[in-house]
Image (cartoon, helix red, strand yellow):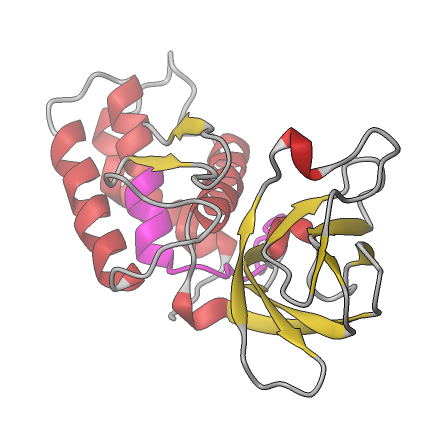
Amino acid sequence: MAVDTLINLVEAVRSEAGHALTPSQGLNSEKTLKKLIARTEKELWTAFTWPTLLIRAQVDVQKDQYRVAYRPQLPYDQIREAYWCAAGSDHFVKMDYGFFEDCIKADGTNSTTSPTVQLWEDDGADDTLFRIWPTPSVSGFVRFRGMRPLNSLINDDDVCTLDPTLITLRVAAELLTRAKAEDAQVKMQSFQRHLQKLLANKVSDKHKVSTFGSFGGYRTRFTRTQRFIV
């Protein structure tokens, strides 16, 4: 995936949407554009699985252990998929996200045990831990697939992590929409086409895309719908 510096992204956005920016709106200030660019990249990184940024991390799990620590290189917000493999096996079982309430007994322990773990969920009480269900009756490990973290976008020479054209089109579409420009929808369509090309139809387990312009949340145990809009 191509990358570029923050200052070049600012200039690219001005080129794409400069005609729609007016002094009264104040949208053409460099500081504002930098913040919009950084926020947009973060939203895009969170919403989708980027094939070129995928990384893996494995976590050992002991028999009867159901609360487990994340690996430092792949915390919760970077994770997109999870798999279980019992010790001595090479068979990976994909784990869904989220529990029914009856999966956890009143005393806080899991409702059942099994050699195959089926579900996982962030522990909630501690952002360093996740929980699995059923409680494993054998040792094994959880393999997470997730995203490489974003580079910081603060200084002019900081380099973006995602495709610069995608970021530019998305920010320009937002600015044009705010300005009620006639070509705002055209710019959004250009963004969507470029997004589809980059994703190559590979989407996240935690954030499945229903249409370009929106994304869904967890699908297995409950539904959380969010909108990704200009």
Horizontal relation, residue 133 to residue 198: left or right? right
Count of number-bearing discs: 0
Left or right: 15, with 7 as reference point: left
Residue 2 lies, in percent from the top left, at 38, 70
Quadrant for residue 225, please give it.
top left
Residue occupying image coordinates x 77% and y 72% = 138
Query: Is residue 155 among what the camera can see?
Result: no
Magenta stretch: helix, strand or loop mostly = loop
In the image, residue 83 above or below residue 165: below
Residue 158's x, y, as percent?
59, 59
The correct choice, above or below, for 89 with respect to 74 in the image is below
* Quadrant in the picture for the C terminus: top left
Residue name at image x 51 percent, y 36 percent: 221
Q: Position of residue 176 (x, y in %)?
A: 25, 27
Q: Which residues are magenta?
A: 152-171
The stretch drawn in magenta includes residue 12: no
Please tell me which residue lies in front, 122 or 9: 122
Q: Residue at point 15% right, 30% down?
A: 185
Name which quarter of the figure residue 223 lies in. Answer: top left
**In the image, farthest residue toward the right:** 107
The quarter in which the N terminus is drawn is bottom left
Q: Position of residue 170 (x, y in %)?
A: 32, 41
Is 160 a magenta residue?
A: yes
Residue visible at 31% across and 55% down?
Answer: 165
Residue nearest the observer in this picture, 187 or 84 = 84
Can residue 160 be seen by looking at this rendering?
yes
Q: Residue furthest top?
A: 24
Foreground: 99 or 230?
99
Query: Where is 170 relative to 185, above or below?
Result: below
127 versus 161 height, above or below: above
